[in-house]
Image: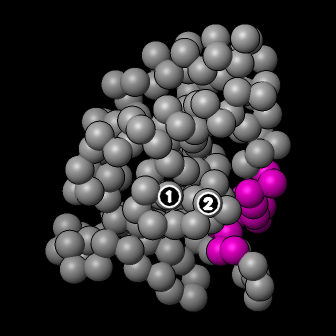
Amino acid sequence: MAVGRFQVMAVLQAARAHILGLELPTAKSWGLNRAIFYAAAKRGFKGTKPYKRSRSEVKEKPVADTPEAFHLGSEVAFKASTDEGPMYFTMGGKVQTEEEFDRQIATRFEGAFDKAWSDAIEYIRGFDKATLLSQSGFFNEVYRPQRDELATKWSQLSKK
């Protein structure tokens, strides 16, 4: 099975979140949540306007955690209500867990996920914190320029 843009977004977002300090289970949840968000945004949201934080809010508090939402730079994701264990995110009534990430994303790599994860971490480390904290910076400078090349590379890697 080929690795597509959805999987690339999820892996890069998870790597971004992990580099910015989230534990791996939470970073995977973030990655899957953001991939779902961008896929929905591509189709167009109906009747809702996404919440955005100002540059000064992001600068003052790059990572903000409230009871309902978690802000990673200028992006926000809604938290699933869990009393114990890792923090997970939710969208459309579904919780994006580490297991869901593995099922929807890692399995597409057919045993080569660890290599792709290492590639993603190395790639993300090449960007400054300001770019990683910016929703548009991440999308336009990190994801967009390499999405198709990474999809091809990781698809070929999974066939070996």
Amino acid under disc 2? Leu
Residue that label 1 marks: 18
The numbered mark, 1 or 2, whose residue comes first in the sequence reads 1
Mark 1 surroundings: few (<14), some (14-19) or many (≥20) residues within 10 A: many
For residue 4, say whether it is visible. yes
Q: Is residue 31 left or right of residue 145?
A: right
Residue 94 is one of the magenta-drawn residues: yes
- Which residue occupies the foreground of this view, 43 or 94? 94
- Which residue occupies the foreground of this view, 24 or 37? 24
Q: Mark 1 and mark 2: span between their CA atoms? A: 6 Å
Q: Which mark, by number, is residue 65?
A: none
- Which residue occupies the foreground of this view, 42 or 131? 131
Measured along the vertical axis of the image, is residue 27 above or below residue 139?
A: below
Quarter of the figure with residue 159: top right
Q: Residue drawn at (81%, 54%), measured in percent from left and top? A: 99
Give the colouring mode of the picture: one colour
Q: Is residue 138 left or right of residue 50?
A: left
For residue 92, say whether it is visible. no
| Quadrant of the snapshot with the C terminus | top right
Contact between marks 1 and 2 (CB within 8 A): the answer is yes
Amino acid under disc 1? His
The region drawn magenta spans 86-100
Q: Residue drawn at (77%, 85%), measured in percent from left and top? A: 84
| Quadrant of the snapshot with the N terminus | top right
Residue that label 2 marks: 24
The single residue placed furthest to the left in the displayed view is 56
